[in-house]
Amino acid sequence: MECLRNTWYMAMWAQDLPQGELVPRTILDEPLVLFRKEDGTPSALLDQCPHRFAPLHRGKLCGDHVQCGYHGLQFDVSGACVHNPHGDHRIAASLKVPAYPIVEKHTMLWVWMGDEPADPALIPDYSIFDAGSGYVISKRDHLTMEAHYQLITDNLLDLSHVSFLHDGILGNEDTIDAAIEVEQKHDTLYVTRRMPNVRPPGMFDLLFLQNGERVDTWFTMRWDVPCCLLNDAGVTRPGEPKEKGTGIFGAHILTPISETRTLYHFAAARQNPLPRSEAETQALQQKLGELRRFAFEQQDEPMINDQQKAYSRNGGMDSLVPVYLSVDAGPVRAARILKQKIEGERREVAQHALQA
C-alpha cells in the first residue's frame, strides 16, 4: 500500500509489550515482531526468518536474541544472525533480518517505517498520557477495523456526524448547527466545532451538570501527519470560558495494517474533572469507558466498514469521489496535506534511484 513511510506509526500501547514475549504487528503490509531487551528497551524486527521465512514471533527470546521457532537461528536487535546451531555453524552475510527504529514515548510504542533517519522529536505530543501528568486516564484500548485508515481519519475530522450516528451520546439535534474553524500549523491541523447554548449530549451531561441544563460545548480535533489525532472536547455553562468547564482529551491513533485494515488505538484523559468521591469517580470512569467503546465499536465501526465495502466494490480508494459538504473542510485539507507529503516522498525515492 502507498502510505507515508518516513514517519512514526504507533505499534501498540507500551503496556501491551510484556517483558519476555514476542508480539507480532503488521504495519503498512509489513509483518513486524516486537520485544523488549532484558533492560526493558523495545526492539522491532521483520517478523520473517530469512532461512525458510517462518514468523519469528513463533519462536522465543534467548536473552536479547530472538530464536526462530523453526530451526533455532538466533538474531540480535540489529537483525544480525548471531547463532546457527547447524553443521559448521557458519553464518552467511545474507543471514540477517531488517530492524526498525522503535521508541517508547507517551506510554506508546512508535515504529519508524522509512529509510530516512528517524527523529523522535517528530512524534506527536501526547504527553497528557505520560505517567505523572496529573490527568485521570481511561483504559488504553484498541480495536481492528476492516477499513482504510483515511476513512477513519475523515470520520474523526468531520464530527458533524455525532449528531446523527452518536445521537444521545456525543451529539443531539441541538449540536447539528455548529461554527467550524480549520487552522493549519505546518503539518498539524486543528478542526474546531463550537456549539453554544445547547442541550448537553449524554456523555457530557455525565461529566458536567448531570441535570440536562443547557451548555456551551466544543470539539477541537488535532490531526498530525499521517493519522494521529487528539480530540479536545468539553462543556461549560453558557457564556463562560472553557477553562471553567470540564471535558475530555481523547487520543485516536491509527495504524495502517493494509489497504482495508486499520489498528485503532484510543484512550482518554479527563480535563478539569468536577470534585467527586472515589466511588463516584470510578463509576463515572467505567460508564464513560463503556459509552466510548460502544460509540466506536457499535456505531462508528459498522458504518465505516460498510463505506470500505463500497470503495472495494468499485476498485479501491481512488475509485469514488465524494460530493463534499461544508462540514468536509477538515478532511479535505488533511487529505491534501498528506497527498503532498506522499508525493514529495515519491519524488525523493525516484531521485535516489536515478543517482544509484
Image: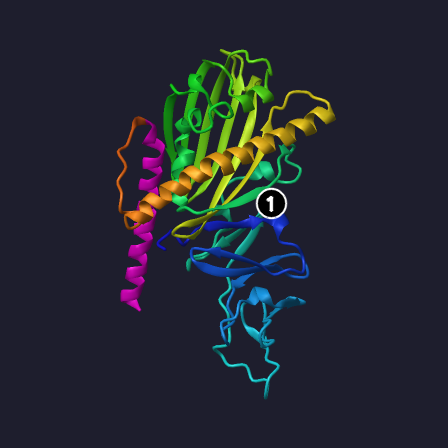
The residue singled out by tag 1 in the image is 107
Q: Quadrant of residue 59?
A: bottom right
Residue lying farthest to the right in this orientation: 278
Residue 334 magenta: yes
Q: Quadrant of residue 323?
A: top left
Extent of the magenta region: 327-356
In percent of width and height, residue 215 lies at: 51, 14
Q: Is residue 171 left or right of residue 33?
A: left
Label tally: 1
In percent of width and height, residue 279 lies at: 73, 26
Residue type, mark 1 in image: Thr
Q: Measuring 49% from the left and 26% from the top, which residue is drawn there? A: 170
Q: Nearer the viewer, residue 206 or 76?
A: 206
Colour scheme: rainbow
Q: Nearer the viewer, residue 302 or 15?
A: 302
In percent of width and height, residue 322 lies at: 28, 37
In percent of width and height, residue 51 lies at: 50, 76
Q: Nearer the viewer, residue 190 or 256?
A: 256
Q: Measuring 31% from the left and 51% from the top, which residue is drawn there? A: 344
Q: What secondary structure is the magenta-colored segment mainly?
A: helix
Q: Measuring 67% from the left and 67% from the top, which residue is drawn there? A: 63
